[in-house]
Image (cartoon, grey):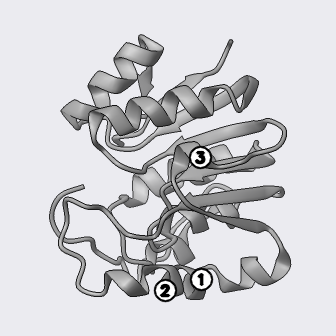
Amino acid sequence: MGGEPEADVGLECMVETVNISPALAVEGWMTAAELAWLAEQAVDHHKIVEIGSYLGRSTLALLDNCDGIVYACDDWKGPRESFIEHRNQLFTNFCLNVGHHILSGKVRIVSGDHADIQFNGKADMVFIDGSHEYEDVKRDILFWKDKLEAGGLLCGHDADWDTVAQAVEETLGAVKVAEDTNIWFKIWQP
């Protein structure tokens, strides 16, 4: 996640039946290939939880391609390891970016610590991209895997970070990494 996020403004991208064009216009660290992978997964899932929504780049890839609900969970303080000039505006900017989905009720905004969130029922997809600190990643995986239905998709960003890779391996064992991305994933079987 280091460095400055980029917005791929002006890029149009349709991968088969998914649309990531709105997502590409939002500032963030996820590549077009990563957004396309998320969008492709969203097509087959109906109750998605996203841990770490930042400005909504990945959230839009999920929302624009899912016919269900996306729970966007974040404290909207931004990545602690990066300089964010207007940190106090993150939530407002997120809401502006996903506003039409807020009005439709398709996104449920959940503000707070990822492991203190009250979540009823089971999700069929959980995407973890919150804190990248080892203990935080491990805590998020342990908490959210229990909120995932059997056969659901458990995945996360930044598989190339040592802290993320260590937490994933210790909690889940072997996982796959989506081709041309830094997204790790596993079909959850409790």
Q: Please tell me which residue lies in front, 177 or 90.
A: 90
Q: Which mark is residue 164?
A: none
Three-letter code for the amino acid on which mark 1 is drawn = Cys
Quarter residue 68 falls in? bottom right
The label nearer to you, 3 versus 1, is 3
Q: Is residue 27 left or right of residue 100?
A: left
Q: Tag 1, which secondary structure? A: helix
The label nearer to you, 3 versus 2, is 3
Q: Position of residue 70 (x, y in %)?
A: 71, 58
Three-letter code for the amino acid on which mark 3 is drawn = Asp
Residue designated by label 3: 116
Q: Please tell me which residue lies in front, 20 or 104.
A: 104
Q: Position of residue 113 (x, y in %)?
A: 51, 53
CB under 8 Å between discs 1 and 2: yes
Q: Which label's residue is closer to the chain start, 3 or 2?
A: 2
Q: Position of residue 29 (x, y in %)?
A: 32, 62
Residue designated by label 2: 93
Number of numbered callouts drawn: 3
Residue 66 visible = no
The residue furthest front is 116
Q: Residues within 10 Å of mark 3 (few under 14, many from 20)?
A: few
Q: Is residue 147 above or below residue 45?
A: above
Q: Which label's residue is closer to the chain start, 3 or 1?
A: 1
Residue designated by label 1: 95
